Image (spheres, rainbow, N blue to C red):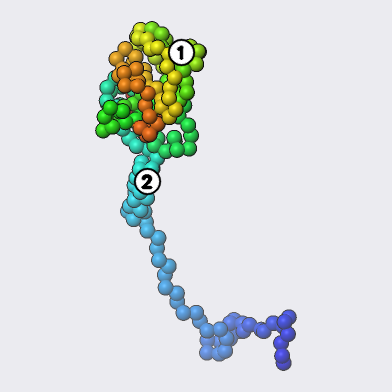
């Protein structure tokens, strides 16, 4: 009999056959499934994945640096260790008030960490320690009264592609008041988080 598309071929019932009679043959034993790595193997695997991820993050996004000096007191102390974001300024603009790391214009082998005070095109004036940007007096809550100074700077316009930097400890900071505005190409990171010592740990603002 030819079968059509809706015909079913009967399946032999193994229960109806004796051990030596017709029916389904016994299935050959299957090899045991391979066991997944456990214990030490899992720990080593997770450790390697974490190490690779950490290397990639540090290489392409964050970099640990150590602060040398006290020009950024009170937020950053000498020997504080912090992470800088090396990628953020590829997708966003440098903003007034950012704490950045840059190559020292007079010796690119050295790095400085300062706060951005004025942007390209800004009219900057400092009158006995008081900063004026585009005719507006700046409120600098990050500079404690005891760290202020009375230095002045005649009004100047920041050139295109340059940024004016100052330290928060104004009375001792060597910054753009001495070496001038910093070219954009020298700025390579934004300070984001202090991780050591633990008493200073936190976001850099």
Residue 7 x/y as whole percent: 72, 83
- Crowdedness near tag 1: few (<14), some (14–19) or many (≥20) residues, C-alpha within 10 Å: some
Q: Nearer the viewer, residue 200 or 77?
A: 77
Residue 9 x/y as whole percent: 67, 84
SS for tag 2? helix
Q: Is residue 115 visible?
A: no
SS for tag 1? strand
Instruction: Look at 40% across and 60% down and name the residue there.
Output: 36
- Name above or below for residue 12 compared with residue 163: below
> Which callout, 1 or 2, points to the residue nearer the camera?
1
Q: Nearer the viewer, residue 3 or 199?
A: 199
Residue 174 x/y as whole percent: 30, 19
Q: Is residue 127 visible?
A: yes
- Name above or below for residue 35 compared with residue 72: below
Separation of marks 1 and 2 at Cα, in angstroms? 42 Å
Instruction: Look at 31% across and 18% down and name the residue there.
Output: 178
Q: Quadrant of the C terminus?
A: top left
Dividing the picture into quarters, in which one does residue 87 lie?
A: top left
Mark sitting on residue 56: 2
Residue 105 x/y as whole percent: 31, 28
Dividing the picture into quarters, in which one does residue 114 lie?
A: top left
Q: How many marks?
A: 2
Determine whether, in the image, residue 30 is placed left or right of residue 106.
Answer: right
Instruction: Look at 59% across and 81% down and name the residue there.
Output: 15
Instruction: Look at 38% across and 34% down and name the residue there.
Output: 185
The residue beneath circle 1 is 132
Q: Earlier in the sequence, mark 1 or mark 2?
A: 2
- Name above or below for residue 170 compared with residue 183: above
Dividing the picture into quarters, in which one does residue 83 lie?
A: top left
Q: Quadrant of the N terminus?
A: bottom right
């Amino acid at each position: 009999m030819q079968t059509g598309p809706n015909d079913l071929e009967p399946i032999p019932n193994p229960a109806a056959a004796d051990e030596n009679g017709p029916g389904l043959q016994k299935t050959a034993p299957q090899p045991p499934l391979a066991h997944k790595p456990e214990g030490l193997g899992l720990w080593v695997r997770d450790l390697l994945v974490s190490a690779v991820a950490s290397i990639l993050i540090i290489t392409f996004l964050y970099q640990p640096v150590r602060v040398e000096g006290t020009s950024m007191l009170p937020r950053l102390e000498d020997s504080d260790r912090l992470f800088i974001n090396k990628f953020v300024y590829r997708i966003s603009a440098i903003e007034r008030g950012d704490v950045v790391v840059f190559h020292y214009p007079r010796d690119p082998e050295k790095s400085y960490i300062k706060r951005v005070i004025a942007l390209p095109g800004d009219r900057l004036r400092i009158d006995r320690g008081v900063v004026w940007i585009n005719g507006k007096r700046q409120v600098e809550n990050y500079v404690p009264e005891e760290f202020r100074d009375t230095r002045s700077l005649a009004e100047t316009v920041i050139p295109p592609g340059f940024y004016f930097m100052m330290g928060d400890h104004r009375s001792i900071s060597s910054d753009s008041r001495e070496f001038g505005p910093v070219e954009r190409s020298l700025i390579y990171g934004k300070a984001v988080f202090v991780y050591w010592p633990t008493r200073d740990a936190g976001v850099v603002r």
